[in-house]
Image (cartoon, grey):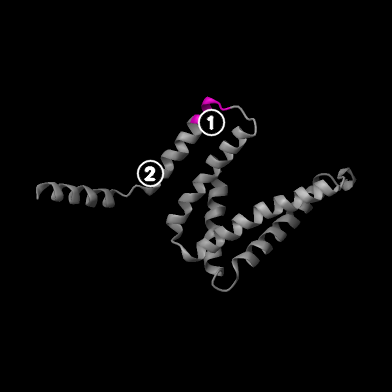
């Protein structure tokens, strides 16, 4: 998780830098092609028998749908990274484990106590990332000044 966090932050900063010269959709496409090729090489190295894959129309359709559901969110993420403040935008990456957990429960996974604790910790981290002591202090002072009048 730590390595993912570091690499995701590095990728987002790089996307912001390259985004001024490269379209975010093109950048995502090249990213997915290069990463897919690397995963193919790893797969060939681990098990060089690709004959176990049976290509059916349903399988190809599902593969295209999965590719689109991966490419579209990443393209939108990198597009947002070009125009938004990265420190504010990165908070929304915390939503991924929440949505993944909710989806897994919807699809039949058991809702367990460790899952609840994990979701609570993620929600707490989102609140902590959005909480600004200086902003809270300013709002408190404005409230006190408003009540004095």
**What residue span does the magenta drawing correspond to?**
111-116
Secondary structure of the residue carrying tag 1 is helix
| Residue that carries the numbered disc 2 in the rendered image | 128
Q: Quick one: 46 or 147, which is closer to the camera?
A: 147
Residue 57 in the image: above or below residue 116: below
Disc number placed over residue 35 in the picture, else none: none
Q: Residue at x 75, y 57 (%)?
A: 37
Residue 46 in the image: above or below residue 35: above
Q: Residue at x 56, y 69 (%)?
A: 18
Which secondary structure class fits the magenta region best?
A: helix
Q: Position of residue 39 (x, y in %)?
A: 74, 52
Q: Residue at x 19, y 51 (%)?
A: 142
Q: Quadrant of the N terminus?
A: top right
Disc number placed over residue 115 in the picture, else none: 1
Mark 2, residues whose alpha carbon is within 10 Å: few (<14), some, or many (≥20)? few
Q: Earlier in the sequence, mark 2 or mark 1?
A: 1
In the picture, residue 124 is in which quadrant?
Answer: top left
């Amino acid at each position: 998780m730590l390595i993912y966090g570091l690499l995701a932050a590095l990728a987002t900063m790089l996307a912001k830098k390259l985004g001024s010269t490269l379209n975010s959709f093109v950048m995502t496409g090249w990213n997915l092609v290069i990463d897919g090729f690397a995963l193919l090489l790893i797969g060939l190295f681990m098990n060089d028998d690709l004959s176990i894959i049976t290509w059916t129309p349903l399988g190809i359709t599902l593969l295209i749908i999965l590719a689109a559901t991966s490419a579209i969110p990443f393209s939108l993420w990198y597009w947002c990274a070009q125009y938004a403040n990265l420190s504010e935008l990165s908070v929304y990456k915390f939503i991924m484990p929440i949505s993944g957990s909710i989806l897994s429960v919807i699809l039949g996974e058991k809702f367990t106590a460790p899952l609840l604790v994990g979701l609570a910790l993620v929600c707490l981290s989102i609140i902590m990332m959005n909480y600004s002591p200086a902003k809270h202090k300013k709002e408190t002072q404005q409230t006190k000044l408003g009540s004095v009048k």
